[in-house]
Amino acid sequence: MVFLINLARVVFAPLIEPIRATTGASNATLGLLATMVWVGSAVPRLPTGFLLTRISRAQAIFGSGVVLTAGTVFTLFAPTPRLLLVGALTMGLASGVYIVAANTLVSELFPRTPGRALGQHGVASQLAALAAPGLVGLALSLGSWRFVLQWMAVGAGATTVGFTLMARRTEFPDAGSEDRDVIAAISAQRRIVLTAVVALGLTTMIWNGLFNFYVTYIKTTGLSEATGRTLLQVAFGAGVPAFYVSGRLADRLPNIPYLLTILAAFTGCIIVIPTLSGFWPLAVATAVTGYVIHSIFPAVDTYLLGSLPDRHRASAYAAYGAGMMVLQAPGSVVVGVLLDNGVPFGTIFQLMAGTLLVVLTTLLVLHADGRLPSGAKA
């Protein structure tokens, strides 16, 4: 299920150029298309926290599968860019519900090694990102990029049924049985939630804008669109070992220093990429960037879910997810608007690097002053 959930969030990145070719949409519209998925993923996260005080994690996951199936079918038949925006939003809604419910459930199923379990879950998610450019390329070879959505709709329906059948035979932990007051949980855990929101929200806003227009950027370096899709696949492919390794490291290393190290490495990547040209230098930099940025996801999830008490876990995690996604979602549309207004990619990369340096410096100063929550691993 998480493979299809994440595929719905990332599939529009390699689809931007094919959709441009068939619809004539502008960069701003295409950026908004990618952004709508992430807006959709942001909107239901806090409501899902309230929902999980009333229904089980498994019931919420089932609901997300139903929404994903319906949203993918709608997008498949959407005839105009405007209706594509609605479909993308709906597909994103499913991911918001799923991630809050499923990540919480995974951490509760494996309370002693949450990082490892979340890392494995993340590997399955990242395989979707790895597969997305190839699936789009295959669909184009068969005649239409919409074939990808056909496969997704069938897969979403089938896995939702499969999950439901397995859930009926599974005894789930009752770790979240006392989590019944969302506002109290957010208030009690506001410092650690805010730290995670700032660290990941602004960082992934940069990543969101970068990867959705990475194929477009690669074309400006003199390489082909097909090469751009290949490099995008390299970035996503590097995330597979990143989730696996980073989840295990997050169980062992001090939480905040590990997070800051990842953030510093990603900032360096953003500074280096626009100085490179040619396939192999860009391929190496892309692989390193993909590994680094995907390392941060299990690190932050472990920091939160491994540190939050049972009585607050789902509610506080939902608040984090909502805040983080609100910051992350505009990344693509911001880049699209900048491009439509004639801002070159070189300047855009400078703005990205400057934003990351501000975030990194602020967190370093607060950590040195002892004002950041250390988490379960101090």
Image: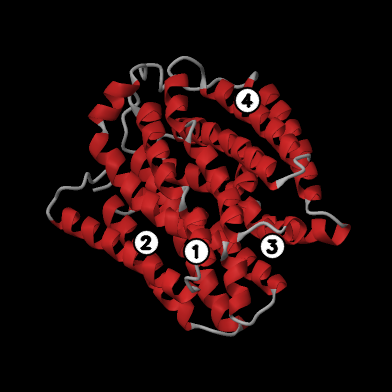
The span from disc 1 to disc 2 (Cα, nearest Å) is 10 Å
The span from disc 2 to disc 4 (Cα, nearest Å) is 34 Å
The residue beneath circle 2 is 262
Of mark 2 and mark 3, the one earlier in the sequence is: 3
Quadrant for residue 152, please give it: top right
The residue beneath circle 4 is 62
Q: Residues within 10 Å of mark 2 (few under 14, many from 20)?
A: many
Which of the two residues, 278 or 311, is positioned nearer the viewer here? 278
Residue 45 % position (x, y): 46, 32
The amino acid type found where label 3 is placed reads Glu
Q: Residues within 10 Å of mark 1 (few under 14, many from 20)?
A: many
Of mark 3 and mark 4, the one earlier in the sequence is: 3
Residue 92 % position (x, y): 58, 39
Residue 159 shows up from this direction: no
Q: Residues within 10 Å of mark 3 (few under 14, many from 20)?
A: some
Residue 34 % position (x, y): 58, 51
The residue beneath circle 1 is 291
Q: Is residue 168 above or below residue 327?
A: above
Mark 4 secondary-structure assignment: helix
Which residue sits at x=60%, y=53%?
29
The amino acid type found where label 4 is placed reads Phe
Quadrant for residue 114, please give it: top left
The span from disc 4 to disc 1 (Cα, nearest Å) is 31 Å
Q: Residue furthest bottom?
A: 278
Of mark 1 and mark 2, the one earlier in the sequence is: 2
Which residue sits at x=50%, y=48%?
119
Quadrant for residue 58, please give it: top right
The span from disc 3 to disc 4 (Cα, nearest Å) is 33 Å
The residue beneath circle 3 is 17
The span from disc 3 to disc 1 (Cα, nearest Å) is 25 Å
Residue 263 % position (x, y): 35, 61
Of mark 3 and mark 1, the one earlier in the sequence is: 3
